Image (cartoon, rainbow, N blue to C red):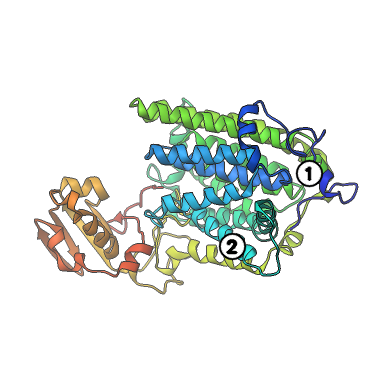
Amino acid sequence: MMLKQDQHGPQSEDSANEGNDGKGVSPGLAPGPYGFLRRCLKPIEYEKADPVIFVVCGLYLVAQLADETEEWESYSAGLLFVGLLLVYGISKNPIIFCVSLLAYMTEQAPSWPDMSNHGNIEMIIDGYILLCVLLRLLRPDKRRRGWRDVAAEIEEALKESVIPVMPHLFSLIYLFAGFHKLNWDFFSTPHGCAFSFTQRISRAWGMQINPGPSLNLVLGVLVIVWEAGGAFMVWSKNIRPYILAFVLFMHMKLSMAVFVDFSALVNVFVFIFVSLSLPRDVLLSHSLVARFETYMWINVIAALDIGLVFWLGGYDDVFHPIQAHAFIVSTAYFFFPLLKDMMRVSKATFTGFIEASKHVRVGGWLLAILFMLFFSSPYLGLRTCGVATMFSNLRTEGLNSNHMLLGSNPLKIFSYQEDLVTFDSCGKDVVTRSHLAGRAVPLVEVQKLVDYLSAPDNRTVTAWARFTYKNETVETEDIRTVDVFRQGKWWEKLTMEFRSIPADSRAVNKCSW
């Protein structure tokens, strides 16, 4: 994939970097009202920044900021990512972008891969970006005379190795998110995700919708068609603008249900599809960079407001609408003119799947294969958390799963999911930590729980339980003393993460993130 050229022919480097007027502190990068900050960062400003690449990277950093500041677990980390985003947004320096990715990976490393779905996606993409940049900078045939040469090579790495594969990753994420939902429990009432999530979103908008079985079925089918079908339909030139508009609309609604971070990540993919569709002169005709700067500042101010609310002891019902409404307003402001242009220009300018695929390099295809294997792990007998299984009710543990097409688990080659521990009852502290009473979970997950309970700070925690393992029922005053729970390979504990399931295999597997 190449970034779109002007519909009247290729542009020179200078004209390609210009918006409507080309005025400002750097060619094509529209000025903002932040002269003091710009003057402070002038020594590291990258004047030759490509506006499209800059906006892609900026949207990505906003998504990571939303993830880091959703609950402000660390004020120092939150302020660090606010600062890095602002420095990048003002200086347009891709070196700062890479520093921010490295900081995110470092900060999240202790939790990885036991992370949210979008967190795992971002960690893998971050690692791929930094690897591509490193390989580019290690090429011996390049002579660098300063940081601007390094910045130029980073942009080239992003343009040649990263951005081309991103639309394909979007399709994979959406395809598997929909495919995982193709299970019987997803449509159940009231525990299916189609039902519970309709309730959750409606409450966020001040309503109370309790869909009956028929409406629940219709909503469930629509969600699967939107996700699994959207993975393919977004490549159709005729309906792409409308698919992207619907994706934005749904994720703006989703943001009201606490998921601003994932919705902000989707904005990155949507913009890349926009850049695949509009000629470059049209794309830059709406002061693209200035609009992004507004988008960035709205979300930064919202993040700081959330931090202040938390510092003052605020609660979810106070802080979340701040972030969600800021995200919705900024997203609508940034994307509306772009989608409007997509609907009016000739669809002949749009890049289709085959043409876009020609620009994906070997490393990009390897990344796509890695994501396919990662998202397929529940069916292979591996982890069931954080692999695009959000709100799916999917259960693959045991001899049979609840999936409509893979009910007999024909792809399963690993046995982790069959090595189940069923908890009949357990102490309050164990329930608080893992919600295991009356549920079953693979052994490796219990071993991870015992490691946590064995930490010095948790040794006073009561950990009695009555459980069944390999057809033997045991009652113990402290699960930390059970030999099999104290064992396990470190790499299995690191890489595996499983949801708990009902102890009765016939029961509905409740909706979970």
Residue 95 or residue 105, whichever sits in front: 95
Kindly identify the amino acid type of the residue bearing the numbered disc 2: Leu
Local packing at callout 2 (Cα closer than 10 Å; few below 14, some 14-19, many 20+) is some
Image location (x, y in percent) of residue 115? 41, 52
Which image quarter is the N terminus in?
bottom right
Question: Residue 17: which numbered mark, if any?
Answer: 1
Furthest residue to the right?
A: 8
Compared with residue 127, is residue 21 higher up or lower down, i.e. above or below?
Answer: above
Determine the image quadrant of residue 338.
top right
Image location (x, y in percent) of residue 414? 38, 73
Image location (x, y in percent) of residue 108? 42, 51
Kindly identify the amino acid type of the residue bearing the numbered disc 1: Asn
Determine the image quadrant of residue 166.
bottom right
For the image shown, how many numbered marks are present on the structure? 2
Residue topped by disc 2 = 134
Question: Residue 312: which numbered mark, if any?
Answer: none
Residue 7 as seen in the image, left or right of residue 305: right
Secondary element at tag 1: loop
Marks 1 and 2, how far apart in space?
25 Å
Q: Give the mark, 1 or 2, whose residue is nearer the N terminus.
A: 1
Tell me which residue sits at (44%, 38%) in the image.
78
Furthest residue to the bottom?
A: 413
Residue 473 or residue 118, whichever sits in front: 118
Tell me which residue sits at (12%, 49%) in the image.
460
Image location (x, y in percent) of residue 165? 65, 59
